[in-house]
Image (tube, rainbow, N blue to C red):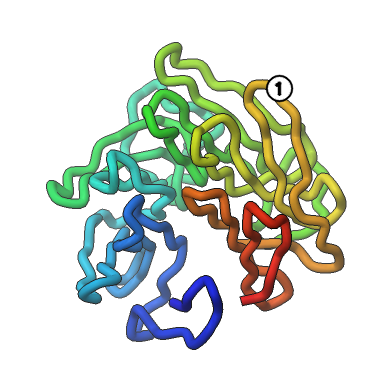
Amino acid sequence: MASSDGGNARAITNGEFYPHALIWSPDNTTLAFAANPYGNDDVFTVSLKTGEMTRLTYHSSADIPTAFTDNGDTVLFNTTRLAADTQDFYSLPVYAFGTKGNQLYQIGTKQKAAQALLPIPAKSAVWNNKKTQLLYNSPHKDQLFRKHQTSFAVPSIWLFDAPTGKHRQLTENKVAAQRPLWNSDNSGFYFLSERSGSFNVWYYDLSTEQETQITTLTDHPVRHLSASENGDLAFSYNGELYRLEKKPNNAEET
């Protein structure tokens, strides 16, 4: 971890296992991540104050966290477990049982009791502040770091409306759109899209359904998007980390 102003980085984990899918708690004092010290990926948290690491899931399938919710008391995660008989056929075909993340679950950081949330592979899922709308990536068969794929295999971004139980596609087909992140007032969200050719940061306004390109980087994809409460963005590009301040609108290497 390093300061957003730049400087030296320090290790948070000891390197004896592979941590990935890192997500910040709302108060920025805890990280949740997936790691495999016991064979398959489980969900862990680590305190940035004390360095204490806590295991949240113990299932034999891979568990991949997507977001904190409930003021940091709950973690959403993708998993593949037994589901209801209404499980969507696309997300859980017989020959694919055991693949990473065919359902969306949640687990308390204190009670550690996992509960099924949606019987679909809702990747990168994140609730709004009121837990009435859930952004997520559609099920897809594209490789995580593939570039310039233009087919129905690439992910799109969907919105689940909890009061009505309806799902709505927001981004177009055949153009990869990844990693939706709500803005501070939940009026829209940031995401990564190849609409301009290479992955860049875009913004989607829910009231107007307009998409606005935020970064215009070329040759290499923007990855690992993160957003702060004040609207600052962080991402990786060409092997380096960048911070994009909401004002002024300039990206600087950290």
Residue 163 is at least partly visible in this image: yes
| Residue occupying image coordinates x 23% and y 70% | 53
Secondary structure found at label 1: loop
Q: Is residue 70 left or right of residue 254?
A: left
Task: Please tell me which residue lies in front, 28 or 161.
Answer: 28
Looking at the image, which residue sits at the far top? Answer: 164
Residue 61 is at least partly visible in this image: no
Looking at the image, which residue sits at the far left? Answer: 111
Task: Please tell me which residue lies in front, 131 or 66.
Answer: 131
Q: Position of residue 36 (x, y in %)?
A: 35, 70
In the rendered image, which quarter is residue 211 located in?
Answer: top right
In the rendered image, which quarter is residue 108 located in?
Answer: top left
Q: Position of residue 223 (x, y in %)?
A: 65, 62
Residue with the mark numbered 1: 208
Label count reads 1
| Residue occupying image coordinates x 23% and y 43% | 114
Image quadrant occupied by the N terminus: bottom left
Task: Please tell me which residue lies in front, 231 or 19.
Answer: 231
Q: Position of residue 91 (x, y in %)?
A: 51, 36
Q: Is residue 199 left or right of residue 20?
A: right
User: What amino acid is found at the position of numbered circle 1 in the picture?
Assistant: Thr
| Residue occupying image coordinates x 31% and y 37% | 82
